[in-house]
Image (cartoon, rainbow, N blue to C red):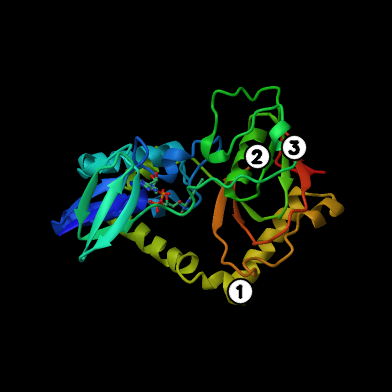
Amino acid sequence: MKVAIIGAGMSGLFLGYHLDRAGIAYTIYEKRPAAGGTWHDNTYPGLHVDVITRSYEFPFARKTWWSRRYAPGTEIRRYLVGFADEAGITPRIRFDTEVTSATYRDGRWDVTDAGGTTETYDVVVAATGFLRVPRLPRLPGMDSFAGTAFHSSAWDHSVPLAGKRIGVVGTGSSGIQIVSEMGNRGHQVRHFVRTPQWIIVKPNPRISMVERLLLRVPALVRYWDWRMSRLRLKTDGTETWRLVPGTDRETMTEQFHRVLREQIPDERLRAKLTPPSRPAASGSPSHPTTTRSSSGTTSNASSAASSGWSPRASSTSPARCTRST
Ligand SMILES: Cc1cc2nc3c(=O)[nH]c(=O)nc-3n(C[C@H](O)[C@H](O)[C@H](O)COP(=O)(O)OP(=O)(O)OC[C@H]3O[C@@H](n4cnc5c(N)ncnc54)[C@H](O)[C@@H]3O)c2cc1C
């Protein structure tokens, strides 16, 4: 049996690891020059994982060198590339090789890459991700905009930000992380908010040396993993904790409102920044995301889906992540 995996992000690497263990031959096609997928493409300021890092690791490839409870994107990238190397997956990846077609013929797949090479496989797995295609808004005047504009997933690090007026469009996890980090750095930033997010502020402390040492004790690791699995039952899978009426959802809703009250004293502005629907009550399940606010904490935001474009602007001051129109 021969398997073709398209994509060397987390999913492709995970599958490669298990195929290796099962003794099944595989090739990973990756159009980028390195592994990591999402974490290779996204390098914007403030990027970090929005779930507790230890629950984002592969359970069979634990690390103890994470710097924070919610690790920065650079560490996740380093982790994935290192994992591919250590697990012996890297030599099986064809970098800079985009798959352009896969054709099912006589019970097998002909996989063709952009260079025109075709190989035949028994199984093809599309591990191509679902958040990797940048969505650029069509804003009037964009073509004649004289400043620099780029998508968060293609951050142009050569552009100096000091002294610039920065506008950020989008209130998903990335938008909030970027705005918060810009505030931390003392930049003038304006956040254009179509749909307000539910936000919870939570700390992102450094992982101390003692904690790192404790994570080397097998019994403590097992205990930690047990706690994580309990947490996962609540936050993953069916996400019932948010969709089903009950104490969990009420507590979460109250936390959201408390953050709004604490961070935004102006009642009128608070009303504008209060999401139109209650947490997770929109049609599509929302993805909880964690962002770092300018006060050195992280926020957990849960977005409600919406349609239509009715821009509202808000800005952050360098000192706090407060917003004003
Ligand atoms: C900014 C950002 C932050 C995120 N933070 C979190 C988080 O904190 N927690 C969380 O759980 N999730 C987070 N996510 C979701 C994240 O996408 C997943 O956690 C995970 O990394 C997805 O991995 P993947 O391998 O499925 O896809 P991807 O990481 O998207 O990898 C897909 C790979 O396929 C390659 N590819 C695509 N098409 C082709 C082709 N035709 N030929 C060859 N190669 C191809 C791409 O180049 C890419 O490397 C985040 C996403 C983004 C964008």
The residue under the point 71% across, 55% down is 195
- Work out whether 130 lies above or below 44: below
Which image quarter: residue 324?
top right
Local secondary structure at mark 2: helix
Identify the amino acid type marked 2: Val
User: For this view, does 96 lie left or right of residue 133?
Assistant: left
All told, the count of numbered labels is 3
* Residue 131 percent across, percent down from the top left: 49, 51
Can you see residue 216? no
In this view, the residue in front, 122 or 217, is 122
Question: Mark 3 and mark 2 in contact (Cβ < 8 Å)?
Answer: no
Counting other residues with Cα less than 10 Å from the Cα at mark 2, is it few (<14), some (14-19), or many (20 or more)? many
Relative to 2, residue 313 above or below: above
Q: Position of residue 2 (x, y in %)?
A: 17, 56
Numbered badge on residue 179: 2
Label 3 neighbour load within 10 Å: few <14, some 14-19, many 20+: few
Dot 1 falls on a residue whose secondary structure is helix
Q: CA distance from mark 2 to mark 1?
A: 32 Å
Q: Amino acid at mark 1?
A: Thr
x and y, in percent, of residue 260 in the image: 74, 54
Q: Quadrant of the C terminus?
A: top right
Mark 2 or 3 closer to N-term? 3
Is 167 on the left-hand or right-hand side of 151? right
Indicate yes or no: mark 3 CB to ligand 1 under 8 Å: no
Image side of residue 225 versus residue 3, left or right: right
Q: Residues within 10 Å of mark 1 (few under 14, many from 20)?
A: few
| Residue positioned 75% across, 58% down in the render | 274
What residue would you read off at disc 3? 141
Frontmost of labels 2 and 1 is 2
The residues bearing labels 1 and 3 have C-alpha atoms spaced at a distance of 47 Å
Tell me the residue that label 1 is attached to.
247
